[in-house]
Image (tube, rainbow, N blue to C red):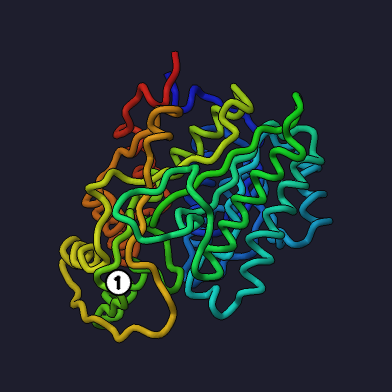
Amino acid sequence: MTMFNNIYKDKRVFLTGHTGFKGSWLSLWLSSLGAEVCGYSLAPNTAPSMFEELNISDRITLSVFKNILDTLSLEKTMNDFQPDIVFHLAAQPLVRLSYFEPVLTYQTNVIGTLNVLEAARKCKSVKAFVNVTTDKCYENKEIDRGYKEDEPMGGYDMYSSSKGCVEIMSSSYRRSFLQSDGTMAMATARAGNVIGGGDWAQDRLIPDCIKAINHEQKIEIRNPIAVRPWQHVLEPLSGYLLLGQKLLTEGKRYAEGFNFGPNEDSVLKVADVARKVCEYYEKGEIIVHKRDDLHEANLLMLNIEKAEKVLSWKPAYGADKAISETVDWYKHFYKKDCDMYKFTINQIENYEESIEWNNYIQN
């Protein structure tokens, strides 16, 4: 009995965005599952970065620092590696940055995704493709319920709308090129606000809290009443891996969009999350910073019934556990009292033990 039916052992996995926050965690998890991983991404853009701190380049098969907009390099790297499956995580992932870099956001998120799809379609070894987007791909009317997978795509800001475009383009791409037998099976995966150790990106709540605490500064929050679905990084990654398993073994039956979010009791206000960070860190003071003119949604939730029914996927952690695991990672990192690679692998193993085994293991 092994995780994901042992599907990733000796599989060749092409992972874009492997130097990012989620990409770093997924690189380690795939490696621990016995996969051969080729990472393709820009170099890390934060200091510190989880990718560099844990020496992830040395823990996977191949690490390539290139842009997904470089089509020649992308296609050559993928064709040379001959992967069985592609996990596409590379993106411009920040809402607020998209106001200042709208062209870069659309180039990376839309054209970049199309480039990766085309490279995978031309590479005959690829059987499955997990295309990661976001919960913000939906036309958000700030309704008091979670969005279902068949609801309209949209987005107020350029980041959200770019991901809505990716979903529409992916559906069109699937119908245009991936209907016949023998072509790769491609699904999209939409996750909520992801937290966990090793994230140092700008304008994200918990990284901002951690930075303020460790610089002995007050924690400034812009929108304390905003409501989001909070989940530990391993939650959506488990969904991506399970979806990848299904695509590899049963193909186009699962070539659709899926939401991977927390249970309703983990949909919390920003201020509540910040307070819990201070509680678990045992320090920190919060102040409300004056908001600027950049629009940010006040309410966004996901409906995860489809993932539960079709994939038998369920979240294992509530918000409290997700926040405590996240804070624990940062506390040990800044104390420098342990090997953070081993600590991170231990968090992955603990999460695996928390999963309802029937959902992830087949006899």
Q: Within 10 angstroms of label 1, few (less than 14), some, or many (20 or more) residues? A: many
> To which residue does mark 1 refer?
209
| Residue 199: x %, y % from top left | 42, 62
Q: Is residue 61 visible?
A: no
- Above or below for 15 versus 218: above
Q: Is residue 44 above or below residue 355?
A: below
| Amino acid type shown at disc 1 | Cys
Along the viewing direction, whichever of 327 and 134 lies nearer the viewer: 134
Q: Residue at x 57, y 36 (%)?
A: 256
- Residue at image point 69% right, 58% down: 112
Q: Quadrant of residue 238?
A: top left
Q: Point out residue 36 in the picture as x, y percentages from the top left corner.
A: 63, 37
Q: How many marks?
A: 1
In the displayed image of the protein, which residue is found farthest to the top? 363
Q: Secondary structure at mark 1?
A: helix
Residue 17 drawn at (x, y percent): 59, 55
Residue at 26% in and 50% down: 266
Q: Nearer the viewer, residue 176 or 6?
A: 176
Up-down relation of residue 121 to residue 308 (above or below) = below
Left or right? Give the position of 138 relative to 64: left
- Horizontal arrangement in the rendering, residue 6 relative to residue 180 (left or right): left
Relative image position of residue 91 (x, y in whole percent): 59, 60
Q: Is residue 272 visible?
A: yes
Locate the C terminus and report the quarter of the image it occupies. top left
Q: Quadrant of residue 324?
A: bottom left
Point 33% across, 67% down: residue: 298
Image quarter where the N terminus lies is: top left
Q: Is residue 219 above or below residue 326?
A: below
Q: Nearer the viewer, residue 328 or 112?
A: 112
Write down the quadrant of residue 67 in the picture.
bottom right
